[in-house]
Amino acid sequence: MGFIPYSTQDIDDADVAAVTAALTSAFLTQGPAVPAFEETFAARHAVPHAVAVTNATAALHLACLALGLGPGGLLWTVPNSFVASANCGLYCGAEVDFVDIDPVTRNMSVEALEAKLESASRLPDVVVPVDFAGLPADLAALRALADRHGFRILEDASHATGADRHGRPVGSELADIAVFSFHAVKVVTTGEGGMAVTRDAGLARRLRALRSHGITRDPAEFVAEAPGGWHYEQQALGWNCRMTDVQAALGRSQLARLDAMQAARERQAARYDRLLAGLPLLLPARIPGLRSAWHIYVIEVDEARTPVSRRALYDALRAAGIGANLHYAPIHLQPFWRARGFAPGDFPAAERYGARALTIPLFPKLTDAQQDRVVDVLAETLARAEAA
């Protein structure tokens, strides 16, 4: 059966044709494919503005800057995410702190955030909730807290392309800016790439300038009178975070298949739910009104029901050629962050999750036979321990 990765890209003939068309066009970059991808993505997510960049880390960084985060500022996020969710604040010269997670949803705990806000001597400028594994965070509750305490919401929806809240696409409302990832293992891929979406035209203009050296070519924004059609102005310090036309062509083609890929992920997640139901494992939450993108499927070892360790399950899966992984080790326990003053015990729910979580394979072309193999290895490893 061969090695089964925890996730992999789904590329079809239409994707190849789209990339080939871009490669043989007049533009490899700064052409029409990027605006077309942005327009398609914005329409799909029911939001007026979408700004494509090199990757989601760049999108988080530029979004923080667009929201005014800088030296002396403060960003809060969750510990159970990829480090970029926190690093983006440091890139801006701000300080970073964390809010513990809800152990059921694995997203930012609204109760923990509210308690931290009420007791804080200093309030955050930006809060970054993460739609972990593709399950939308409770942005309605976070929006109410943001309006009360005056912080901006930067939604890290890197896992959540295709997800929705009560029928509304993630990114369409509630957050000031939402960021998506198009890394190779994500729901939609451009190889590497990211997107920031917003309902605020001013934020969108700021994002577009920041992704291209802080330069504008829009005559309506010029400070000086333009001497000719060649004129442009650098009005801020920006970066080169432009997506290429080749990447955008792939992304737009992928979006055309998002519904089909989403349906495949949902079917596989439901099948895992059924096949794993009798094992001493904690499975992903199902929350009424929230549709997950199912970027990944994460189980947790239920220590109250089995002596088997997460390490034993990981080793057994890997020995069987199954690409189990961890998403994620708590950020605040990484050496870099511990050197900044964080320590074990600071965020117990995230630490408990991080000690027993395991990501198992889920991607659109995962077969039933492959899925059965994953389940069999888990069941056999757990049964051997109980029999010993």
Image (cartoon, helix red, strand yellow):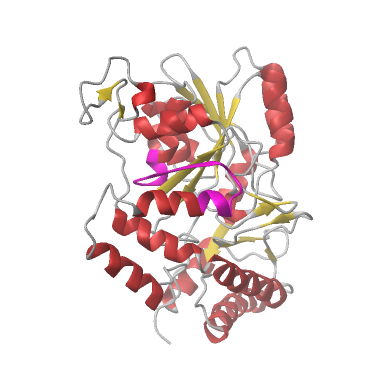
- The residue lying toward the viewer, choosing from 148 and 367, is 148
The quadrant holding residue 251 is bottom left
Q: Which residues are magenta?
A: 41-58
In the image, residue 251 above or below residue 223: below
Question: Is 315 within the magenta?
Answer: no
User: Where residue 133 sits in the image (x, y, percent)?
Assistant: 57, 55
**Which residue is found at the position 55% from the left and 21% from the top?**
125
User: Where residue 198 sits in the image (x, y, percent)?
Assistant: 54, 37
User: Where residue 295 sits in the image (x, y, percent)?
Assistant: 54, 60
The quadrant holding residue 129 is top right
- The residue lying toward the viewer, choosing from 76 and 19, is 19
Question: Considering the image in quadrants, where does the N terminus appear?
Answer: bottom left
- The residue lying toward the viewer, choosing from 263 and 276, is 263
Residue 355 visible somewhere in the drawing: no
Residue 34 visible somewhere in the drawing: yes
In the image, residue 243 above or below residue 305: above
Question: Considering the image in quadrants, where does the C terminus appear?
Answer: bottom right
Question: Is 54 within the magenta?
Answer: yes
Q: In the visual, does 43 lie left or right of 24?
A: right
